[in-house]
Image (spheres, rainbow, N blue to C red):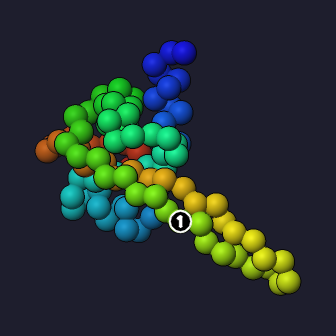
């Protein structure tokens, strides 16, 4: 398997919310949904390879499942894993600027 395909399997998609967008300017942090099996080292390598930037720190968070209802039908929304990536000073990603 190619290294590029592996990196894109680790990084699922960027998380664009008000809170994550505020962190891009203030703390130079970017948030991604990642694969459930991805480690911090794999996330760091994937961001560095795909976006060609230097990563200072990676924080990984497991988001829990949430109960949901629609009338009489009850179920759960699936949980996911996300990573908050802090870049080196003076570097940015074009992910947040596109939205």
What residue is drawn where x is 49% and y is 53%?
81
Image coordinates for residue 90, horizontal then vertical, percent: 15, 43
Q: Is residue 23 above or below residue 32?
A: below
What residue is drawn where x is 44% and y is 53%?
82
Q: Residue 45 or 99: which is nearer the viewer?
A: 45
- Asked whether, in this view, residue 63 is left or right of residue 46, the answer is right
Image coordinates for residue 29, horizontal then vertical, percent: 28, 53
Q: Is residue 73 above or below residue 83?
A: below
Q: Quick one: label 1, few (<14), some, or many (20+) residues within 10 Å?
A: few
Examine the rendering and report whether any part of residue 47 can be seen. Answer: no
Examine the rendering and report whether any part of residue 3 can be seen. Answer: yes
Residue 95 position by quadrant: top left
Residue corresponding to mark 1: 64
Quadrant containing the N terminus is: top right
Image coordinates for residue 11, horizontal then vertical, percent: 47, 39
Residue 49 position by quadrant: top left
Q: Secondary structure at mark 1?
A: loop
- Asked whether, in this view, residue 82 is left or right of residue 12, the answer is left
Please state the total of marks drawn on the protein image.
1
Residue lying furthest right: 72
Q: Is residue 74 above or below residue 25?
A: below
- Asked whether, in this view, residue 88 is left or right of residue 5, the answer is left
């Amino acid at each position: 398997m190619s290294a590029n395909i592996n990196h894109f399997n680790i990084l699922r998609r960027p998380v664009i919310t008000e809170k994550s967008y505020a962190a891009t300017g203030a703390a130079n942090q970017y948030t991604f949904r990642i694969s459930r099996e991805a480690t911090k080292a794999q996330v760091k390598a994937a961001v560095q390879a795909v976006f060609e930037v230097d990563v200072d720190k990676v924080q990984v968070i497991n988001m829990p499942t949430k109960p949901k209802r629609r009338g009489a039908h009850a179920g759960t929304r699936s949980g996911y894993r996300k990573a908050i990536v802090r870049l080196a000073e003076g570097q940015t990603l074009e992910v947040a600027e596109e939205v």
